[in-house]
Image: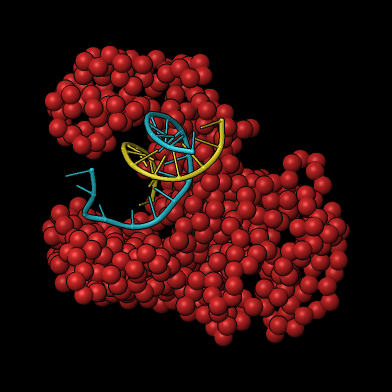
Chain colours: A red, B yellow, C cyan
DNA sequence: GGGGTGTGCGCG
DNA sequence: AAAGCGCGCACACCCC
């Protein structure tokens, strides 16, 4: 059963649509009464169909109402809009409309505020009709796409729940770490003492008394004046150079990064009441990965400060990450049994060595990454032919994806998320280069652009399918955590607290840690089954039950 | 002072 | 200075 949620000027309508598509009579509830209505319907496990999970779910959670399943019309439209694998009717032929909107920020209702107040009643009243859009999407959906839309929508629920619960964060531990590394918190605009000390060392070593090491251009100039043959101030190039200025400069850069990305200002603006609230954007990346928004930088949380993530007293963090997820995904979508078998022992790279494709684990890893990213030169490019001999199906699949991209054709993930096609200037460059009398420079440029797009489509099928697996994994985790915690509120029972592409952190009472460990592994297996049925690919996890995130890995 | 671009670096 | 994918952000620096 689907329940279509539609915002009216001062109320909400709920319209049932049964599995045959028959539309029932709408119920109108007041905005204040919506939470109770949802709670009452939940016993029957309907799928809530609404314009945007961010518009509804934060307030429901704030009112203590959990939703089991939903269909996020905006996210699903974005997938269907682009797909070439649609059913009877393709939204890609529709003109752009309000359903193609950019993601909205998820904002929980402030404490005590009335539920579901719209600032702009006009906007609410003139919103496009969710029922019509839902029917359109149903008509455009194949069974595979239906799986993707369900996974995407489950992800939307997870993202809001994580933001609601937050990641436990001990500000005093973070502060101690900053003070130990940088010195005491400086006044606004001042450098911390450790950075100032290193800046002085750099200036002396380069004989550049006024140098501001924050300026890449000025630093490069000073380095060259000191006789150093470098073309940038990036750390990997500097680390090749032997000069007394280099060590303090690299250390300065390390501290400057910590200070500006995750320093005291970050702490002030992103941690409150012992929690960091990640702001995820499901589907924010073309491949289907999530992105994050705002200075919190949820998907860039450096390892350096993860020790500040500490479970509440009597609770544990269960940190699980999927080992070598992308190569395993590649083995599955290519139905490469040899590669899947190489991963069966638990370490795919060791397995690749074992079948004799390459001689060391490091080689296996660098060759595998090269295959998925499209390396052509260096060690990685050199090892590729050997990998291709051992795993012709897997390598063939990424090669085909690259060729499609080079032609300007789209590619699709396992469940049917389709890559964008290159913009018109890309096509212009290609036709210009193939015309009579095209200059060598124009041909080079076009070839470069074609290969670059080929690397994108090559990676798209793997990264995008891995993102689908991760969504399915989290959907299973979410539902099993709920079964474990019963009807107690989200934050008082085991819950997802963080997500990082192929890794999750669950915050759970210590007595549930073992059960969570088990259900996270079961969920990985279930996600593999859901996507790849009986194909014998495995998705082993590294799971750590810890008090602080810094202890994991 | 706002906006756009380049550099550099964090994450997977 | 990237070989080899996908992101977001801070800062410098330039323009208006």
Percent of width and height locating residue A208: 25, 17
Percent of width and height locating residue A112: 80, 41
Quarter location, residue A17: bottom right
Percent of width and height locating residue A173: 50, 26
Q: Would residue A392 be found to the left or right of residue A78 on screen?
A: left
Residue shown at 32%/24% (left/top)?
A213
Closest to the observer, A453 or A331: A453
Q: Give the total number of marks visible in the rendering.
A: 0
Residue shown at 15%/54% (left/top)?
A378
Percent of width and height locating residue A31: 83, 56
Quarter location, residue A78: bottom right
Closest to the observer, A528 or A15: A15
- Decide: is A498 above or below A450: above
Quarter location, residue A429: bottom left
- Decide: is C15 above or below A194: below
Residue A333 visible in the snapshot:
no
Closest to the observer, A479 or A147: A147
């Amino acid at each position: 059963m689907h329940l279509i949620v539609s915002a009216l000027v001062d109320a909400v309508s709920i319209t049932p649509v049964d599995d045959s598509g028959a539309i029932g009579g709408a119920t109108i509830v007041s905005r204040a009464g919506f939470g109770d209505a949802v709670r009452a319907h939940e016993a029957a496990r309907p799928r809530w169909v609404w314009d945007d999970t961010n518009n509804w779910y934060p307030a429901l959670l704030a009112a203590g109402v959990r939703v089991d399943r939903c269909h996020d019309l905006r996210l699903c439209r974005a997938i269907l809009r682009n797909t070439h694998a649609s059913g009877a009717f393709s939204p890609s032929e529709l003109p752009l409309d309000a359903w193609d909107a950019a993601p909205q920020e998820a904002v929980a209702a402030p404490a005590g505020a009335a539920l579901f107040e719209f600032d702009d009643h006009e906007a609410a009243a003139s919103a496009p009709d969710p029922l019509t859009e839902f029917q359109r999407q149903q008509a455009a959906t194949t069974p595979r796409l239906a799986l993707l839309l369900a996974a995407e929508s489950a992800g939307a629920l997870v993202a809001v729940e994580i933001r609601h619960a937050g990641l436990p964060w001990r500000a005093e531990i973070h502060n101690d770490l900053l003070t130990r590394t940088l010195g005491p918190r400086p006044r606004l605009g001042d450098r911390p003492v450790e950075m100032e000390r290193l800046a002085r060392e750099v200036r002396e070593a380069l004989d550049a008394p006024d140098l501001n090491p924050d300026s890449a251009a000025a630093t490069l100039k000073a380095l060259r004046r000191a006789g150093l043959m470098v073309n940038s101030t990036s750390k990997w190039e500097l680390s090749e150079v032997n000069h007394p200025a280099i060590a303090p400069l690299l250390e300065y850069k390390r501290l400057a990064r910590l200070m500006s990305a995750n320093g005291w200002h970050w702490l002030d603006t992103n941690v409150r009441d012992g929690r960091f609230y990640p702001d995820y954007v499901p589907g924010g990346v073309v491949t289907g990965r999530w992105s994050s928004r705002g200075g919190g930088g949820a998907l860039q949380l450096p390892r350096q400060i993860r020790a500040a993530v500490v479970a509440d007293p009597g609770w544990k963090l269960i940190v699980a990450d999927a080992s070598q997820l992308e190569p395993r995904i590649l083995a599955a979508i290519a139905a490469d049994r040899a590669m899947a078998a190489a991963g069966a022992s638990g370490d795919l790279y060791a397995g690749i060595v074992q079948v004799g494709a390459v001689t060391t684990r490091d080689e296996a890893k660098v060759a595998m990454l090269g295959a998925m990213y499209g390396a052509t030169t260096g060690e990685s490019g050199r090892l590729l032919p050997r990998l291709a001999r051992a795993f012709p199906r897997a390598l063939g699949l990424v090669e085909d994806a690259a060729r499609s991209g080079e032609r300007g054709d789209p590619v699709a993930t396992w469940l049917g998320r389709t890559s964008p096609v290159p913009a018109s200037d890309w096509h212009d460059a290609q036709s210009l280069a193939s015309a009579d009398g095209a200059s060598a420079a124009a041909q080079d440029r076009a070839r470069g652009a074609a290969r670059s797009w080929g690397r994108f489509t090559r990676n798209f099928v793997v990264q995008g399918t891995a993102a689908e697996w991760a969504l399915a994994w989290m959907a299973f985790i979410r539902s099993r955590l709920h079964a474990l915690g019963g009807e107690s509120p989200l934050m008082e029972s085991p819950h997802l607290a963080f997500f990082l592409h192929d890794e999750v952190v669950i915050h759970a009472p210590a007595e549930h840690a073992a059960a969570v460990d088990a259900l996270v592994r079961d969920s990985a297996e279930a996600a593999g089954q859901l996507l790849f049925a009986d194909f014998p690919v495995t998705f082993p996890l590294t799971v750590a039950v810890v008090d602080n995130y810094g202890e994991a890995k």
